[in-house]
Amino acid sequence: MSKKVLLSGVKPTGRVHIANYFGAMKQFVDLANEYESYIFIADYHALNFIQNKEEMRQNIIDILLDYLAIGLDPKKVTLFKQSDISEHPELAWIFDTFVTMPYLERAHAYKDARAKNKEINVGTFNYPVLMAADILLYSPDIVPVGQDQKQHVEYARDIAEKFNRIFGEIFKLPKEIIMKDMENIPGIDGRKMSKSYNNTIPLFAEYEEIKKCVMSIVTDSGGGIPQNVYAIHNLLRPASELLPLYESKAGKYKELKEMLIEDLEKFIAPLRERRKKFEKDIPAALAILKAGGEKAKKVASKKMEEVREKIGVKIY
C-alpha cells in the first residue's frame, strides 16, 4: 500500500521562531517516515506582506536553509516553492468562480484586518482560496498546522466539497493535525509568540540573543512560578521533570531564566551549526528546492488535467 500524504508550508516573512518549530515544523520531521510529505515555501502568500525583491529572495533562501537544518531529508520529503508551480494560482482562479464573497468575509484574517480599519488588498481577502488550491492539488490526507491556520484547512474541505458537488468527485477532503498544547506558546511579552508582535525567540539564535530574549520574558510580581518562563521551558522538558524544579526555586526568577537559557542553548546549538553548514553551499540547497519543485509539478499538473476535464475546458 502507498503511504498517506502530508502537506504543509511556511510563509517566508521573516525569521522562524521556536513556536513555529514546536507548533508545526517539528511535525514535518517527525512524520516524514510515515507519510509521503510535501513541504512548500509559500512565497506567493508572502507577497501580501513582503513587496521587496531582495527581501523576498533572501527570505525564501532562509526558509529553505531552516527546513534543511531542522532535519527535513530531501530523500524523504519533497521540498518546493509555491511560485514554481503555476497550477496553484490557476486552480485558485477556478475556485474563485464559485466561492462567494460572504463566505470569504468569515475568514479570521479578513475580519481582523477589518476590525483594525486596514486597507485590505485582494490577496488578503482571497488568501483562503489560494491556500485551498495549495492543499488540494496534492490530495493530502493530513495538513499539520498551528491552531490559527485550522480555519484554512476547513475552507479547503468546504471548497473541495463544493467543487465535487458541482463538477464531480475529484478532490480528497484533508484533515488538519494540530499539536496538542502548542496552540498558544507565549512570547517574551506574554502574548502569543508571533513575528507580528516582535516577541519571539528565534529558532537559530546565537547564545547572546537567546540570553537577551529570555531575560526579557515578562514575569508577574506575585512570586512563585513565572508562568511565561515555565510555558516556554515546558517545550524542552516534560512537566514531571520541570515542575518540581520550578517549585523548589519558587520566586527565584533569575535562576529559573538562567536554566531556560542553558536548555535553549543546548537545543538550538546543533540546529544552528547544521544551518551554518548548509549556508556555506547555497547552490546545493537551491538544487534541492528546484528538484523538489519538478517532482511537485508532476503531481500538480496531473491533478490540474483532471480539473480541466471536469470543468469542460479540456477539448483536445
Image (cartoon, rainbow, N blue to C red):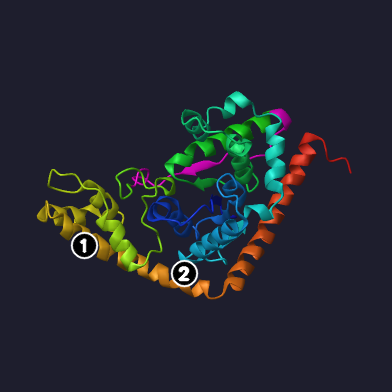
The quadrant the C terminus occupies is top right
Task: Tell whether 51 sits left or right of 264.
Answer: right
Which residue appears farthest toward the right when viewing the image? 316
Q: Measuring from the top left, give residue 208's x and y in whole percent.
A: 31, 66
Provide the residue designation for mark 1.
258
Q: Is residue 172 visible?
A: no
Residue lying at 70% horizontally and 41% vertically, measured from the top left: 91
The quadrant the N terminus occupies is bottom right
Q: Amino acid at mark 1?
A: Glu
Question: Is 184 inside the magenta-drawn segment?
Answer: yes
Task: Tell whether 246 sits left or right of 36.
Answer: left
Picture quadrant of residue 245: bottom left
Provide the residue designation for mark 2.
275
| Frontmost residue, 6 versus 264 | 264
Q: Which is closer to the viewer, label 2 or label 1?
A: 1
Which of the two discs, 2 and 1, labels the residue nearer the N terminus?
A: 1
Q: Which residues are magenta?
A: 166-185
Q: Measuring from the top left, give residue 133's x and y in whole percent.
A: 64, 42
Whole-number angstrom distance, CA of label 2 to CA of label 1: 25 Å
Question: Is 141 inside the magenta-drawn segment?
Answer: no
